[in-house]
Image (cartoon, rainbow, N blue to C red):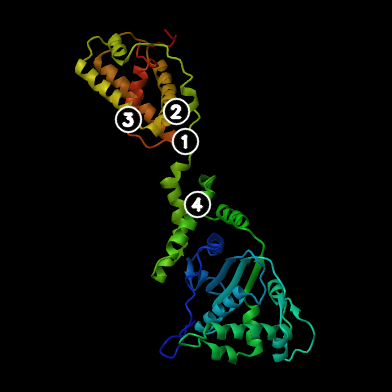
Amino acid sequence: MTVSSGVDAPSVICREAGDKTKGFRFQKLRAAIRFLQRIDANKDGLVHCAMELLEDSVLIDGSSGAKISGEENKYYGSSLSFNSSAIKNTIVAFLDLYFSFGRTSDLKLGVYASATIAQERISVEIRKVLNITCRQSFYEILKHLVEGKCLSSEELAIARSLTTEEYVAQYKNKKSTGFLALLEGMTNEEFRKFLEGIDWSISEESNEDLEQSALDAIRTSRYFTHRHANLESFLLSSLLNELEKRSGKPVPSDRILNTDTLRNIFSEILLGSGADFRVEDPAVAEWDELAANDFRNLQEKILSVCPTFSLSKLKVLARICGLARTVEQEGQREMKGLLRRILDVCEAELLGMPATQVMTERQVLDAIDHLTSVAEQHVTSLRTTYRYKQRDNHSIKGAVLTLFDDCFLALDEVPDGN
């Protein structure tokens, strides 16, 4: 595959930076769908994707029949015909690419638009220049291209005339005439092959329809696992954001994503920010319904089983407890759920301990450390399902101590509840 270059190569109009305000989401969604589908089709090699590079979206895939696939993605609020400026502009752009890439079969071009299709109204003057003697003035050139039908010789002549006229008009005030000489030198059969070789897809598909297709492509991706369930919209948002962010890079090569980029998006959503999408623990609602059954505070409960417990160590435990109560306002609900869960496992542990009314200082500290360890393991398991932030051993210990201080736990409780 060769691309025209050198001092004798004509200067062509740069069309990489299109209008990003109209239908930009449509363009991003279509690029994402093509990227996802192509990656699943090529399981061994790398697929590259970019926006605003050659065309609205481009795929580079060595395993495909055409190594480079460029597509014009537009969302229109009005009807389109082959005589519409949007279509004629696209054909001129495609011709520049066709000739720039040396007419190679490694380049595949397509149009994917949301619009209704209208008939072409051809003036008497144009039909007279083309020696068309019939009285017909309305044609269905674009409709036939979308349907994959072979154009009649009359339709082909009209399409070529409109294209050449548009090509001349676009380069009228440019320093170069582009590839006008090559266009005029094309045989009718070559022009037919070029025009009918474009993938034409025009329907009334909305952004909502396209988004659903993109989500389906996410779910069927080979990187999607059961752990990604309910994260489809976040995965799609990450991919669209990456496409948009890179599309504005000044260096063309920096606009390109590849298979590894997609794999990283699927991985990172589980390793990092995926925690943001876990659900809130329903235990939050149960905390306020609990009734205290022991109105002694932390110090009283410890001294009741160990009267000789060091006062300095009691102060340390009290400070840990006090620090645990300093919770940011937005974390109050999460802390309620956390305390409710820790209460359950600590009560179970206490009920399993030998009944005693007297403990040494070491036994008291070991008991608190044991409850902290059990609670920490439980919180770690909860984080796989519920929205809890990461907490260290010290903060978990503080939560355990607040349960003692808040009249819920006591070391002198025994299995019969006394």
The local secondary structure at tag 2 comes to helix
Using the image, tell me which numbered label, if any, was put on residue 395: 3
Q: Is residue 392 left or right of residue 222?
A: left
Number of other residues with Cα within 10 Å of mark 2, as a class: few under 14, some 14 to 19, many 20 or more: many
* Rendered residue at 42%/31% (across/down): 334
First along the sequence among labels 2 and 1: 2
First along the sequence among labels 2 and 3: 2
Read off the residue under disc 4: 235
Read off the residue under disc 1: 386
Q: Amino acid at mark 3?
A: Ser
Number of other residues with Cα within 10 Å of mark 1, as a class: few under 14, some 14 to 19, many 20 or more: some
Marks 1 and 3: in contact by CB < 8 Å? Answer: no
Counting from the top left corner in percent of width and height, residue 324 is at 32, 27
Number of other residues with Cα within 10 Å of mark 3, as a class: few under 14, some 14 to 19, many 20 or more: some
Task: Reply above or below: 109 against 227.
Answer: below
Counting from the top left corner in percent of width and height, residue 318 is at 27, 20
Marks 3 and 2: in contact by CB < 8 Å? Answer: no
Work out how far the residue at label 2 is from the one at label 1, CA to CA, in angstroms.
10 Å
Residue 413, by quadrant, is top left
